Image: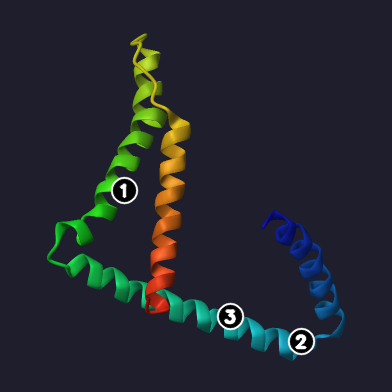
């Protein structure tokens, strides 16, 4: 999989150079408008998914994102705000594993994006 990533970057760059050489301003503007419309459409669909999940009667469906979000938020609050403030008063408190918290936040965001992609594709 990494070989495809290594190959795709130069190919994209070459394509971008060729596009810039042979693309008119009208084509660029129409592509930009199309991309903005696509992004707006995806944002609207995400809002619909969020409303459906939030209205679900099961706490396991409507409550997992807020729960994990609050845990991650409290961890960040502790590590980056409370701990430095308390450290100025010579209060020695333990540090949390910020790498694990960071991995959890990235995984949470990634799984949320993956689930939204699946819902858009209706799987």
Q: Tell me if 93 is positioned left or right of 98 in this view.
A: left
Q: Residue at x 39, y 14 (%)?
A: 88
Dot 3: few (<14), some (14–19), or many (≥20) neighbours within 10 Å? few
Closer to the chain start, of discs 3 and 2, is 2
Quadrant of the image containing the N terminus: bottom right
Which residue in the structure is indicated by mark 3?
A: 35
Residue at the top extreme, as displayed: 90
The residue closer to the viewer here, 100 or 72, is 100
Q: Secondary structure at mark 3?
A: helix
In the rendered image, the vertical position of residue 7 relative to residue 106, given as above or below? below
Residue 41 sits in quarter? bottom left
Q: Tell me if 98 is positioned left or right of 68 in this view.
A: right
Which residue in the structure is indicated by mark 2?
A: 25
Which residue in the structure is indicated by mark 1?
A: 69
Residue at the left extreme, as displayed: 57
The residue closer to the viewer here, 39 or 4, is 4
Q: Position of residue 108 (x, y in %)?
A: 39, 51
Label 3 to label 2, Cα distance in Å? 15 Å
The residue closer to the viewer here, 37 or 88, is 37
Closer to the chain start, of discs 1 and 3, is 3
Dot 2: few (<14), some (14–19), or many (≥20) neighbours within 10 Å? few
Dot 1: few (<14), some (14–19), or many (≥20) neighbours within 10 Å? some
């Amino acid at each position: 999989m990494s070989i495809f990533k290594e190959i795709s970057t130069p190919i994209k760059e070459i394509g971008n150079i060729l596009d810039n050489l042979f693309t008119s301003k009208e084509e660029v503007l129409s592509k930009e408008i199309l991309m903005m419309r696509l992004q707006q459409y995806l944002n609207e669909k995400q809002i619909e998914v969020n409303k459906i999940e939030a209205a679900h009667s099961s706490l396991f469906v409507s409550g997992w994102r807020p729960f994990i979000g609050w845990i991650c938020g409290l961890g960040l609050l502790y590590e980056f705000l409370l701990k430095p403030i308390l450290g100025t008063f010579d209060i020695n408190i333990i540090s949390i594993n910020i790498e694990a918290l960071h991995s959890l936040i990235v995984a949470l965001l990634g799984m949320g994006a993956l689930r939204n992609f699946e819902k858009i594709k209706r799987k």
